Amino acid sequence: MDLSPGKHYIVAIDGVSGSGKSSTAKTVARELGILHLDTGAMYRAVTFLALEAGLSPRQTPEIDALVKGLHWDADAQGKLTVDGRDLSGDIRTAPVTAAVSDYARIREVRHSLVPVQRSIGMRQPAVVEGRDMATVVFPDARFKFFMSASPEVRARRRVMELQSMNLPADYAQVLSNLSERDSKDSGREHGPLTMAPDAIEIDTSGLTFEGQVAIIVSHVLKNLP
Ligand code: DC
């Protein structure tokens, strides 16, 4: 892999759900003027397409065939299409969110998506965001960050987000869903959520959004030639 600084450098951002990872990664990419690749969106898209095709997570051969047949594309900003379809609206719905951990843990799904993620990320400097960016997909990334936050802070943020969308929000329920997803994502065999030993941990519990963006952007700019 050629990840020479200043050339095709990669900023890998991993972390738990609700740590503020996605919005941070998006803003960091915009401030650095580089591509943003949201790999969670890819696992969500596979989940949406599997549900659409009526495939349960246990139908591994059918899911494997479905994923192998997909054509992924990312524009200059990192906006993804799958077989020419923009699924950004469909992949944030409650059924997809509830099911995605069960599809993301399938070895065949990860084996198909990892090379696609590498090929998109290697084309130009990029902020790549997910659970296994710094450990599995881009172990040689020039910059590695791991975002965390206490479960209570993350649940409060999610409740506020749901309330702002006028959706039902029960704190205890949200907290238990988050914990369930954390343990599924961390406990799986392939590409589990773990912090790379050389990653910088950012606990966002007491940070403002602007503060967490600034930590990453200033670290990258200080360390580029
Ligand atoms: O970041 P997110 O909530 O959109 O991720 C959706 C799901 O995909 C979540 O259950 C974790 C999983 N995921 C993964 O297994 N590996 C990645 N690189 C990114 C996301």
Image: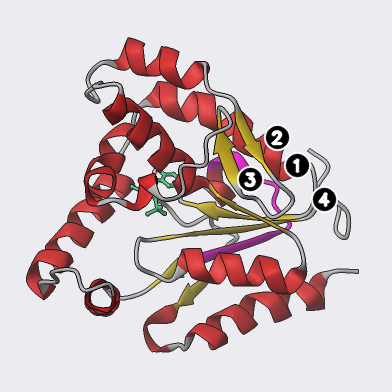
Q: As drawn, is 41 to the left or to the right of 77?
A: left
- For disc 2, the neighbor class at 10 Å (few under 14, some 14 to 19, many from 20) is few
Distance from label 2 to label 1 (Cα)?
5 Å
For marks 2 and 3, the one nearer the N-term is 2
Residue 186 falls inside the magenta stretch: no
Give SS at disc 3.
loop
Task: Identify the element where label 4 is drawn.
Answer: loop
- How crowded pointer 1 is (Cα within 10 Å; few <14, some 14-19, many 20+) is rated as some
Q: Tell me the kind of residue under disc 1.
A: Met
Q: Could you tell me which secondary element the residue under label 1 belongs to?
A: helix
Q: Are marks 4 and 1 in contact (CB under 8 Å)?
A: yes
Q: Amino acid at mark 2?
A: Ser
Q: Which residue is mark 3?
A: 139
Tell me if residue 149 comes above or below residue 68 in the rendering. below
Crowd rating for badge 3 (residues with CA inside 10 Å; few <14, some 14–19, many 20+): some
Locate residue 22, reporting x and y percent.
49, 63
- Distance, label 2 to label 3, CA atoms, is 14 Å
Q: Earlier in the sequence, mark 2 or mark 4?
A: 4
Kindly identify which numbered label has been placed on residue 122.
1
Which corner quadrant holds the C terminus?
A: bottom right
Q: Quadrant of residue 123?
A: top right
Can you identify the residue that label 4 sits on?
A: 8
Q: Which one is in front, 22 or 130?
A: 22
Label 3 is placed on what type of residue?
A: Pro
Mark 3 or mark 4: which comes first in sequence? 4
Disc 2 to disc 4: CB gap under 8 Å: no
For the residues carrying marks 3 and 1, which lies nearer the camera in this image?
1
Residue denoted by label 2: 119
Q: What residue do we see at 37% from left, 29% from top?
A: 49
Q: Nearer the viewer, mark 3 or mark 4?
A: 4
Please state the extent of the stretch shown in magenta in the rendering.
136-146
> Does the residue at mark 2 contact the one at mark 1 (Cβ under 8 Å)?
yes
